[in-house]
């Protein structure tokens, strides 16, 4: 099944059908990503041909839901790219907290690993003037994120990251609970708000001091990358910070930012 090869027209046909039955338009996602998601789902459902897959999309809401969820890729671990968090602690966050209010945005949150990493990190500063806005692309994500339970498997996935961090070394310091019922042991004292919204439909203008949009651009084609980055840029204050994935670039939007740490993809929005 994993050897299945799809033509461009077949992939486009499937995503056109998905758009029709779900309302989600993934046409500007990277082609290789779209094909991989189809093949993996067909394999899990034991579907052998495109016609049967399209029939399932047309007649099974569960299949549609699983397909859509798979397109919104979640983080697999907390404190991913640990050196970025060290850089935030060493060079960025203390200066950021000199502002009367610090507004942080996570424009695309699915299961909460990035949020809880940020809440644990921010909580170390014991500040009450931090405001975090979490935007999530699926209506059911909010409760999932708020009630996020971490398992032993989750701990194992992030253990190497935590060992690299300068501000904490043990998973026992990060998580509280027993066996597969653990939560993040944070002392975040700031404001936390949630918003169900597609990033392209957000209306925030010159508002945020820090935006975490990491490891998302790799799933988009060039046009969508530029469109999303333009929207995010408009939501940021001048001099605001944008952090993307280590393997990602700003492409056509690079002229609007100063690269603070190239190997970590930490950028500062230019003031002119």
Image (tube, helix red, strand yellow):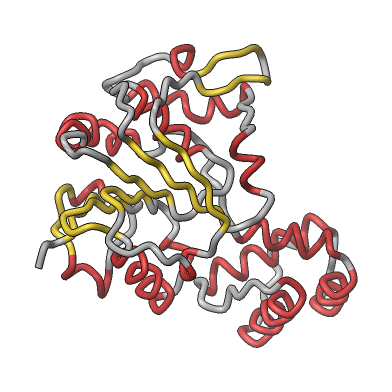
Taking 260 as reference, is 165 above or below it? above
Q: Quadrant of the C terminus?
A: bottom left
Residue visible at 19% across and 51% down in the picture: 262
Q: How many marks?
A: 0
Q: Is residue 186 above or below residue 76?
A: above
Judge left or right: residue 258 versus residue 240: left
Instruction: Give the residue at the far front of this rendering.
Output: 100
Residue 149 appears at what percent x and percent y?
64, 28
Residue at 18 percent across and 39 percent down: it is: 99
Q: Residue furthest right?
A: 59
Q: Quadrant of residue 202?
A: bottom left
Q: Is residue 105 left or right of residue 156?
A: left
Relative to residue 238, is residue 189 depicted above or below? above
Seen as rendered, the residue at the extreme left is 272
Residue at 22%, 48% in the rendered image: 263
Q: Quadrant of the N terminus?
A: bottom right
Rendered location of residue 93, percent (x, y): 22, 34
Residue 94 position within the rendered picture, expressed as x and y whole percent measured from the top left:
18, 31
Give the side of residue 244 with respect to residue 196, left or right.
left
| Residue nearest the observer in this picture, 214 or 139 | 139
Q: Nearer the viewer, residue 46 or 219?
A: 219
Q: Is residue 21 left or right of residue 130?
A: right
Question: Residue sitting at 40 percent across and 26 percent down?
Answer: 189
Spot occupied by residue 147 in the image (x, y as percentages of width and height): 64, 32
């Amino acid at each position: 099944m994993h050897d299945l090869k799809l033509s461009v027209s077949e992939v486009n046909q499937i995503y056109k059908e998905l758009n029709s039955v779900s309302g989600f338009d993934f046409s500007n996602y990277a082609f290789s990503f779209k094909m991989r998601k189809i093949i993996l789902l067909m394999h899990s459902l034991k579907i052998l041909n495109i016609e049967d897959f399209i029939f399932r999309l047309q007649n099974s809401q569960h299949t549609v839901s699983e397909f859509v969820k798979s397109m919104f890729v979640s983080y697999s671990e907390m404190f991913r790219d640990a050196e970025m968090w060290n850089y935030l602690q060493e060079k960025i966050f203390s200066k950021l907290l000199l502002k009367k209010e610090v507004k942080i945005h996570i424009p695309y949150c699915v299961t909460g690993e990035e949020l809880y990493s940020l809440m644990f990190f921010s909580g170390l500063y014991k500040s009450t003037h931090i405001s975090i806005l979490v935007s999530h692309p699926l209506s059911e994500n909010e409760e999932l994120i708020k009630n996020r339970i971490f398992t032993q498997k989750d701990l194992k996935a992030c253990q190497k990251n935590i060992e690299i961090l300068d501000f904490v070394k043990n998973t026992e310091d990060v998580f509280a609970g027993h066996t597969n019922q653990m939560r993040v042991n944070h002392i975040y004292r700031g404001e936390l708000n949630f918003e169900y919204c597609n990033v392209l439909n957000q209306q925030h203008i010159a508002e945020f001091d820090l935006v975490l949009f990491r490891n998302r651009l790799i799933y988009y084609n060039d046009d969508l990358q530029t469109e999303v980055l333009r929207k995010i840029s408009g939501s940021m204050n001048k001099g605001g910070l944008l952090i993307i994935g280590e393997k990602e670039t700003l492409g056509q939007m690079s002229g609007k930012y100063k690269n603070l740490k190239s190997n970590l993809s930490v950028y500062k929005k230019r003031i002119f």
